[in-house]
Each structure stands twice: as structure tokens, then as C-alpha cells.
Amino acid sequence: MANTYLSRTQSTGTSDKKGTFSAWIKASDSNFAIFSGHTDSNNRIALYLNETLRVYGAIGGSQSVYFITNRVIRDYNAWYNIVVAWDTTQGTEANRFKIYINGVQETSFSTSAYPSQNSDIYWNKGTTSIVGARFISAVQNQLNGSMSHVHFIDGTAYTASAFGSTDSTTGEWKINTSPSVTYGNNGFFILKDGNSVTDSSTNSNNFTVGGGTLTKTEDNPSNVFCTVNALDSFYQNTTLSEGNTKIAFNNGWAFNTGTLGFNSGKWYWEVRSNNWSAGNQSYGITSAVADASDDEYYNNSGSGRGYGLYNNGTVYGNGILGTGYTSSGYGYIGMIAVDADTNQIWFGANGSWETGSGPGSTGISIVSASTQDSGFWFPAFSGGINSAGNDFKINFGNGYFGTTAITSAGSNASGIGIFEYDVPTGYTALSTKGLNL
């Protein structure tokens, strides 16, 4: 999803006192809503993030339930499974409302106001359900991130084990793609294998797009793709959006890195600029955090921390390594390929390689990642004082530049990722599956 939300009008529910919500989310920032139900501003409930995970509900204008976890959620590279289950018929207060994150029940809260016994919960009682936003006096906090396998269960409180399990090898919480649950009258299962808002449960409780643009992403709980790292942004002179695949430059020096790094393998991604010929823009790789006064591509204490192509047609990497590269103005699509096994990098533009004839020929030599600050290379992007109004939209393999789908897919990248242009043989998308090929 990219700054959008989904909605549907509910019918009479199976139960206003029992239910379960489960979703896999990949956050892009610390403040967005996941799910809510409401009739009006006095009768509502919402599950949302504000650094911590929160649930707030009201009936008749008075608070009915309120939870704030002590645990923070700010790993913007990770998918989280959030499960909320309630059964207000329970005599024991702690059994009336339960929250699970990645299969583990949360028990540490800064605020924990349990619902009264036999009270109604507006997730199901309300007339409207919203996914990817919440309602206060109007719809707000639209999701700028990704969601997958969104379930609502009307009438039964399930534990997290219905929706996932612990991998016996890695110890990680993994998705159950076909949970055995009874959905009830208002229950639904959407965003199952893409951006379909058609209900995949036994019901026909379909949603509609309420605003923004709903896009499909290859990024999913089983294969996490690189995005731009919201926690590593020098000077904070950029604005990230569209699932942290778009960088809008503000007025000042800026430098951002990717969320996934590598020290071996062959990698490919694409960068689209809305105006490559204007401002001070560049993209490439870095081995350092975003902490330089300019960027990490050249002459940082002579360490050669990174390699980047600037929009003046120059490739830097602890000095000038090449000149005369394409500057083609609006709609420029840059191609970048990195071979971390032979320590070479290639840059291309609009379907043609400019460093030699691309991978397979001799590229620009880079030092081994093992000799650098972090021991890994990361995708990197920078802008300068004249970059305001320009942006980068990065296709790490999702098949989109922001919310715009690629024109026609090139050959695949070892079966991982969708790109505009042909991916060189042996190269793949920077994702967890790609890292484990």
C-alpha cells in the first residue's frame, strides 16, 4: 500500500463480544493505522502504531479499551505479524483482550485498560471497517507501508498459533498461509497473494479502495526486499514514502542507505529520477552509515567508503573514476549492478549499460566490502542543496517505481523480483531469498 486505505460497510455480526484480527505488516514509519471499526467518533476502535503498538476504543464517547505496549516497533525492514483477540465474556480481566506480536503474547504495557465483562467491541459492532487507516472524526493515518494476509474473525477469539508458527531451524515466526478458522458473518481474508481486496474467506465481504493507490509488492513475509532505511538518513533532508521506495529531496544535503547489505553475490536494482539533469543527485553503494557532511561516495578520509554516479555524469569513489555518463532529464531510469565476488560495479541508463558493456565485461573496480567500515555494501542515494523538488523512486524488484508499474518486464532475476530492463545473468534482487540463493 502507498498512502491509502480500504473500507467496507459491515452487516450484522455474529458476535460483538468475541473476535480476532490478524495481519502481517511492514512499517515505513512510526505512525500509521492498521485496522479500525466505527459508527461515529463516539463509537469506534482502532489498532495503530505510534512507535509502540496501540489499541483504543470508545463507546458512547467514553473509553472502553486502551492498550499501549512498552515494546516499540521500528524495524522498518521487518515484517511483523500482529494478532489481537478479544472475548469480553471471560470472567478474568486479563483473558478478555490479548495482543500478540510474532507469536508472542504481549504482557508489558504502559497502559492497559481492559474492557468490562460482556461489553461490546466496535471492531465488529461498528457500521464501517477500515484497513490501513483509522477513524477519529475522519479517516486519518493512512498506511504508508505494506500489509499482507489480513484476517478478521467474527465470533471467535483465536491465539496467534492459528496464523503462524515458529520455524524449527531459524526460530523465526513464519506465516500460515491457510489458517483453519471460522470467519463468522463479518469475517474476511484480504490481501492474500497480492493487492486483491476480494474476500478470500468463505464470505463475500469485499473491500474497496478508499483513497490513494493500492499497489502490489513482491515484498512479503516470506521474502523481505530491500527498501530505503528510514533510520539512516543523514540531515533528515529527505521525505520517504510509498513503502520507503520513494525519496523526495528537500533543500539541503541528504544521504540515505538501503535496509539490506551484502558482502558477496551479484545484485541489481533500478532508480528512476523525476528530473535527473537538475540538482545534485547521485546513487550507488556505501559501506558506512549516513554521517558525512556531503555523502559517502568520495574522499571521506581517503577510505573509499562508497561509489556513486552523479547527475553531472561523473562516477566518484575516493576520487573520479569515470566521466561522460548519461544525463537524460525527466523520466531517467538508472541501472546498477554490483558483483561483490569480483569487486566490480556497473552503471547503466534507460536500458543500456555505460560501464563497458555491462556485467560480463570489465566494470569499475571497487574494494572488498570486508575492508570497509561495516564489512557490507548497501544501496545508497544522495541529494544536494539544489535537489529540492526532485525525487528517486527505486525498484528493488517490486515491479514499481513508486505507484507506477514498470512498462514491460525484462528477464527475471533468478526468479526473484520484477524489473524494467533485462537483469544480467546470475544477478538478482536484493532480498532475503536473494541473499540465500
Image: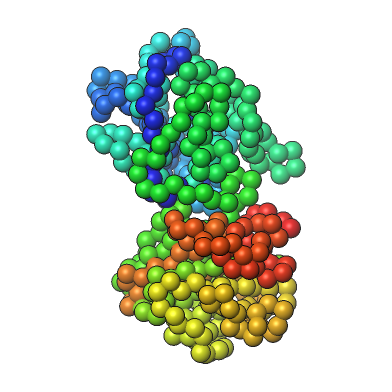
Pick the quarter of the image with the C terminus: bottom right
Taking depth in this image into account, of 199 and 134 the one nearest to the observer is: 199
Q: Can residue 194 be seen in this snapshot?
A: yes
Compared to 22, does 153 lie above or below? above
Residue furthest to the front: 408
Taking depth in this image into account, of 239 and 296 the one nearest to the observer is: 239
- The percent coordinates of residue 404 (x first, y second) are 45, 58
Give the quadrant of residue 115: top left
- The percent coordinates of residue 387 (x first, y second) are 35, 74
Compared to 430, does 286 lie above or below? below
Q: Residue at x 61, y 84 (%)?
A: 355
Q: Can residue 396 be seen in this snapshot?
A: no
Q: Is residue 17 left or right of residue 350?
A: left
Q: Residue at x 39, y 30 (%)?
A: 8
- The percent coordinates of residue 262 (x first, y second) are 65, 65
Q: Is residue 209 left or right of residue 135?
A: right
Taking depth in this image into account, of 49 and 347 the one nearest to the observer is: 347
Q: Residue at x 48, y 61 (%)?
A: 401
| Number of numbered tags placed on the structure image | 0
Give the quadrant of residue 70: top left
The way the protein has been coloured in the rendering is rainbow
- The percent coordinates of residue 367 (x first, y second) are 65, 80
Give the quadrant of residue 249: bottom left
Compared to 301, does 426 lie above or below? above
